[in-house]
Amino acid sequence: MLDNFASGSLIKTLLLSLFISGTGCSEKSKTTINSQTTIFSSSLKPKEELSTGSIKGQVFWSGPTPIVEGFTGPISPLSEHASKPRLPWPNPNAPKINPINKGIQHAVVFLDVPETNNLNKISFPPAQVETDNFKMQINQAGTFSPVGFVTVGDGVDFVNKQDFFYSIRARGDAFFSIPLSNKNKPVHRVFTKPGIATLTTGTGQFWMRSHLFVLTHPYAASCDKNGSFEIANLPQGRHDFKVWIPNWRVCEKEIDAETWEITRLEFAPPATKKFSASILPNSAPIDQKIDFALSDMQAQK
């Protein structure tokens, strides 16, 4: 009987030891996991501490300034307007070249990648496409331009500033139509696909045209009147950029069957150039010089 009691005590002691030992392993494993998580979290720098840099430069026209002829026509090709005076209208894609330094205003420079993983993602200032006095412009941060920028997932307001019915068409990397029948009443449109949306009218004002760049990142700029640009807060590393200007060469015309007036123009593909730059943190902006010439336009088929 004493032997049975001793054997039972020994078994209980062994079981208690195993329980205590198992509890200790569990606590040790839990502590190790918490320690690793803390180290990983602390290794992520706040957004404002990320290493960034910038590029700047100028886009120039090389050679004689091209002479781009405009068009004539009524304010609408529809029959009720066809008998009204024919007015001069500019070519919407004619380059705006500074006569002093040959800088190309409204040339677009942007980071040529489908998307970025940068933690400092931000949106562009709100953009509004405005029609007024038979012109179409993009109002962004108080600046009017034939080009504008929007981040994927953000929206743009379309607003008619005059007493005239317009229908805005988007083609290229977007496909939709927006009627603007009410003066000063914005119509909001959200863009969910990256690319370049070419905006025209579906009501025959063939000289009204704008371009909206829908991007997954904020790294883009439109050149000022001197052809200058700067893109800030770029993540460090080597990046590819693209420079874009529209082509003014008409490749197709649509004519109204009744009035024989132009209703729509199609232009040759835009001219683009690429360059690469290595971005270093806390360094002076890298200065780029990009030239376009007449041959760049003629090369586009």
Image (tube, rainbow, N blue to C red):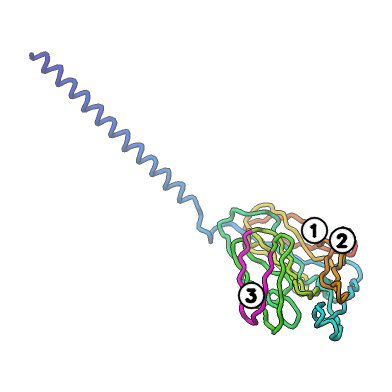
Secondary structure beneath label 3: loop
Residue tagged 2 = 296
Total residue callouts: 3
Extreme-bottom residue of the structure: 85
Is 296 in the magenta? no
SS at badge 1: strand
Residue 64 placed where, x, y %? 91, 70
Amino acid type indicated by mark 2: Asp
**169 is higher (above) or lower (below) than 135:** above
Q: Quadrant of the N terminus?
A: top left
Q: Name the quadrant containing residue 72.
A: bottom right
User: What's the CA distance linking mark 2 and mark 1?
Assistant: 9 Å
First to last magenta residue range: 176-192
Q: Looking at the picture, how far across and down is residue 128, in whole percent?
A: 65, 74
Please tell me which residue lies in front, 266 or 19.
Answer: 266
Using the image, tell me which numbered label, if any, was put on residue 273. Answer: 1
Residue at image mark 3? 141
Residue at left 77%, top 56%? Answer: 274
